C-alpha cells in the first residue's frame, strides 16, 4: 500500500496551524494549480525573464518549483526575486551545489568535490563545502539543494560520479556527507540526497541509457541501503530518484517480475513506495532526476511516464521537455486515473510541507522572500576563499612517486616541456595559460608541446633540450559518453608519455581520478580534482616542494591494473 505522509512526523514536524495552511491552500487550488505544483521547471537565460514574462509563464503553468541555468550572482538573485514576487504560492528554488557556491552561480566559490573531500579526509573540509554551498546559494534566494550525492563509487569506470562521490564504501560516504549537510543546513536551505537507489556500481551513465544497479538484496542493504536508512532515520527531507533500476531487489519485492518489466526507480512503485517509503519508512518528498535523461525516456512513451512518475510515488517531476505538452500529459494522466486523487493529495501535502518547513508562506506574507543585493557580499568572500585554499592544501593527492623524482627543483630541472591534454581546446585554453604562468612563476622555463603527430623526432633531443616533462589532463565530460578516456588525437601520438625514461615526467589530472588506466606507465601521478586557479597554484607549490602532499587516495585510482602501481 502507498504510504501517506504524516506531516506531524519527521522530517516535517508541523503543527496544526501549519497543516491547516496546507489543507486550506490545497482546497483553494484549481486542478490546473494542483498539477502545476508537481513540476519543477528549468529556466534558461535568466536575464531574459522580466516581470511580465515570468507572470505570463506562472499564470499559464503554476509550477511548484524552479531551477535555472547558471549565471552571475546578481542576475540569478534578480531572477529569483522576480519569480517569488510573481508566484501565487512561494516556490521551491533549487541549485546543484555539490562542491560549493559555484553550483549556484558562475562567480560562486568552489571548495571541494566529493572525491576531493574524501582525499582531504577532513570533517572541516566536508563541513565547509556544505557551509559555503548553503551560504552563497541562500544569498541568491535558493532554498533547496539537490545535493549531497550519496552514491558509492564501486566501479572505477563510472565517470558520471567519479568526482562527485564521497567514497567507495558506505561508511566514508556517510561520514563526509553528514558533515556536508551539517554545514549546509546552517542556512535556510534543505538538502536532497541522490541518486536513489544508487549510482556507482556500473560504468553507464543514466543520462544516456537505463542505469542499472545490479547488487543483490543483501549487498544493497549493506551498502546503499545503509546510507539511505541512515539519512531517513536522521530525518532527511527529500530524496532524488535516479533513472536507475535495481533488478534483484525489484524482483524480490515483486515476485514474477520479468526482465522486460524492470523499470527505473522514478517510475517503479516497488522501489519508491514499497522500498523507500514503506520498508525504509521515508516520510519526506521524492523528486525525479531530470526527465530528459534517456534512462527514463527509453522506458516508455513520454505521455505515459510523465504521470507514471507521480503515480509510482514520486512527488515532483523534474523539468519540462515541451512545457505545453508535458503539462497536458500530466493533466491527462490525472483525468484518466493514472494519478489518483489520493496520490495527488499526498504529493501536494509533501510539496507544501517542504515549503512550510522552509517558512516560505510566512516569508511570502511578510514580504521577506525577496533577497537584497547586500547579501551578495558573501559570494567569493575572503572567508570562503580561505576555506577553498585549505581544502586544496589538504586534498591534492600524490598517487605515485615510484622513482622518487618529486619534488622537482626548478634550479636543477629548469627547462620544462608541457603537454596539455584536453577534450575542449577552446574552453581549456584559459586554464592552460594559468598552468604555464604558475610554472614560470615557480622558476621553470616552459615550452608548450604543440605538434601532435606520430614522429617523436630524435630521442636524445628530449633530454638535450628539456629537464622535466609536465603532462596536465584537463578533460571534462558530462552526459556525452558513458566512460571518459584520454583521446590522444592521432595514432601513437607523440603526446603519449613515451619519454618517462628520458626525463622525469609528472602527470597531473585536473578532474577525473582514474587516468592511470590510460597512462599506467607514468611514475609520478597527481590527482588535483579541479582546474581552479587556487588548486593549480597549490599543485605546483607541492610539485616543487614548497608544500607537502597531504591527500589520500582509494584503490579505484589504480583501475584494477597492477601495472598502474609500478
Image (cartoon, rainbow, N blue to C red):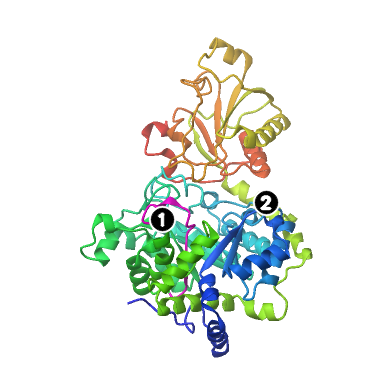
- Left or right placement of residue 118 versus residue 414 in this view: left
Q: Position of residue 92 (x, y in %)?
A: 59, 69
Residue 259 location, quadrant:
bottom left
Give the secondary structure at mark 2: loop
- Left or right placement of residue 560 versus residue 354 in this view: left
Q: Could you tell me which residue is drawn at 25 percent across and 62 percent down?
A: 251
The label shown at residue 296 is 1
Q: Position of residue 35 (x, y in %)?
A: 51, 72
Q: Could you tell me which residue is drawn at 51 percent across and 22 percent down?
A: 500
Q: Is residue 116 above or below residue 131?
A: above
Q: Sequence order check: which comes first, mark 1 or mark 2?
A: 2
Give the residue at the far bottom of this rendering. Answer: 16
Q: Which residues are magenta?
A: 283-301
Q: Is residue 116 visible?
A: yes
Q: Residues within 10 Å of mark 1 (few under 14, many from 20)?
A: many
Is residue 548 found inside the magenta-colored segment of the image? no
Give the secondary structure at mark 1: helix
Contact between labelled residues 2 and 1, with CB atoms less than 8 Å apart:
no
Q: Which residue is mark 2?
A: 106
Is residue 285 found inside the magenta-colored segment of the image? yes
Quadrant occupied by the N terminus: bottom left
Q: Residues within 10 Å of mark 2 (few under 14, many from 20)?
A: some
Q: Position of residue 55 (x, y in %)?
A: 67, 68
Residue 191 location, quadrant:
bottom right
- Left or right placement of residue 276 versus residue 440 in this view: left
Q: Is residue 199 visible?
A: no
The label shown at residue 462 is none
Q: Is residue 410 above or below residue 540?
A: above
How far apart are the alpha carbons under marks 1 and 2?
29 Å
Q: Is residue 242 above or below residue 34?
A: above
Considering depth in this image, is 540 or 258 the residue closer to the camera?
258
Considering depth in this image, is 363 or 163 the residue closer to the camera?
363
Amino acid at each position: 500500500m502507498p504510504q501517506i505522509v504524516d506531516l506531524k512526523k519527521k522530517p516535517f514536524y508541523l503543527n496544526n496551524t501549519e497543516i491547516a495552511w496546507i489543507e486550506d491552500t490545497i482546497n483553494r487550488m484549481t486542478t490546473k494549480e494542483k498539477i502545476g505544483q508537481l513540476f519543477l521547471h528549468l529556466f534558461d537565460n535568466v536575464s531574459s525573464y522580466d516581470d511580465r514574462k515570468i507572470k505570463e509563464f506562472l499564470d499559464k503553468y503554476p509550477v511548484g518549483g524552479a531551477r535555472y541555468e547558471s549565471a552571475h550572482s546578481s542576475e540569478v538573485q534578480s531572477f529569483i526575486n522576480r519569480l517569488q514576487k510573481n508566484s501565487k504560492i512561494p516556490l521551491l528554488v533549487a541549485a546543484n551545489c555539490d562542491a560549493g557556491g559555484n553550483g549556484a552561480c558562475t562567480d560562486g566559490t568552489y571548495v571541494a568535490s566529493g572525491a576531493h573531500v574524501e582525499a582531504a579526509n577532513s570533517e572541516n573540509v566536508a563541513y565547509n563545502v556544505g557551509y559555503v554551498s548553503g551560504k552563497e546559494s541562500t544569498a541568491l534566494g535558493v532554498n533547496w539543494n539537490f545535493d549531497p550525492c550519496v552514491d558509492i563509487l564501486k566501479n572505477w569506470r563510472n565517470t558520471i560520479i567519479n568526482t562527485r562521490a564521497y567514497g567507495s564504501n558506505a561508511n566514508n560516504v556517510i561520514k563526509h556527507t553528514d558533515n556536508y549537510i551539517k554545514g549546509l543546513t546552517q542556512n535556510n536551505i534543505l538538502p536532497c540526497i541522490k541518486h536513489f537507489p544508487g549510482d556507482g556500481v556500473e560504468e553507464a551513465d543514466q543520462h544516456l541509457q537505463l542505469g542499472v544497479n545490479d547488487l543483490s538484496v543483501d549487498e544493497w542493504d549493506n551498502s546503499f541501503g545503509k546510507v539511505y536508512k541512515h539519512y531517513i532515520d536522521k530525518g532527511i527531507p527529500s530524496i532524488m530518484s535516479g533513472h536507475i533500476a535495481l533488478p534483484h531487489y525489484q524482483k524480490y519485492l515483486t515476485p514474477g517480475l520479468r526482465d522486460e518489466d524492470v523499470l527505473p526507480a522514478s517510475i517503479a512503485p516497488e522501489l519508491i513506495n514499497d522500498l523507500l517509503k514503506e520498508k525504509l519508512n521515508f516520510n519526506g518528498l521524492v523528486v525525479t532526476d531530470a526527465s530528459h535523461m534517456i534512462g527514463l525516456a527509453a522506458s516508455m512513451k513520454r505521455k505515459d511516464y510523465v504521470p507514471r512518475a507521480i503515480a509510482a510515488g514520486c512527488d515532483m517531476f523534474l523539468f519540462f521537455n515541451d512545457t505545453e505538452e508535458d503539462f497536458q500529459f500530466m493533466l491527462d494522466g490525472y483525468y484518466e486515473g493514472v494519478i489518483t486523487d489520493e496520490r495527488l493529495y499526498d504529493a501536494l501535502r509533501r510539496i507544501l510541507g517542504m515549503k512550510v518547513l522552509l517558512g516560505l508562506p510566512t516569508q511570502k506574507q511578510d514580504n521577506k522572500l525577496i533577497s537584497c543585493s547586500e547579501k551578495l557580499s558573501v559570494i567569493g568572500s575572503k572567508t570562503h576563499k580561505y576555506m577553498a585554499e585549505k581544502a586544496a592544501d589538504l586534498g591534492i593527492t600524490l598517487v605515485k612517486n615510484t622513482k622518487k623524482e618529486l619534488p622537482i627543483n626548478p634550479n636543477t630541472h629548469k627547462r620544462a616541456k608541457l603537454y596539455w591534454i584536453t577534450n575542449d581546446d577552446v574552453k581549456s585554453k584559459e586554464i592552460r595559460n594559468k598552468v604555464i604562468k604558475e610554472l614560470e612563476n615557480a622558476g621553470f622555463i616552459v615550452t608548450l608541446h604543440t605538434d601532435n603527430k606520430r614522429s617523436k623526432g630524435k630521442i636524445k633531443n628530449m633530454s638535450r633540450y628539456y629537464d622535466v616533462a609536465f603532462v596536465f589532463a584537463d578533460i571534462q565530460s558530462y552526459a556525452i559518453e558513458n566512460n571518459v578516456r584520454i583521446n590522444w588525437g592521432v595514432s601513437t601520438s607523440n603526446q603519449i608519455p613515451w619519454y618517462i625514461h628520458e626525463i622525469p615526467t609528472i602527470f597531473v589530472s585536473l578532474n577525473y581520478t582514474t587516468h592511470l588506466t590510460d597512462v599506467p606507465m607514468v611514475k609520478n601521478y597527481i590527482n588535483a580534482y579541479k582546474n581552479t586557479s587556487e588548486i593549480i597554484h597549490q599543485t605546483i607549490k607541492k610539485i616543487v616542494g614548497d608544500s607537502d602532499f597531504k591527500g589520500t587516495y582509494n584503490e579505484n585510482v589504480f583501475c584494477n591494473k597492477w601495472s598502474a602501481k609500478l
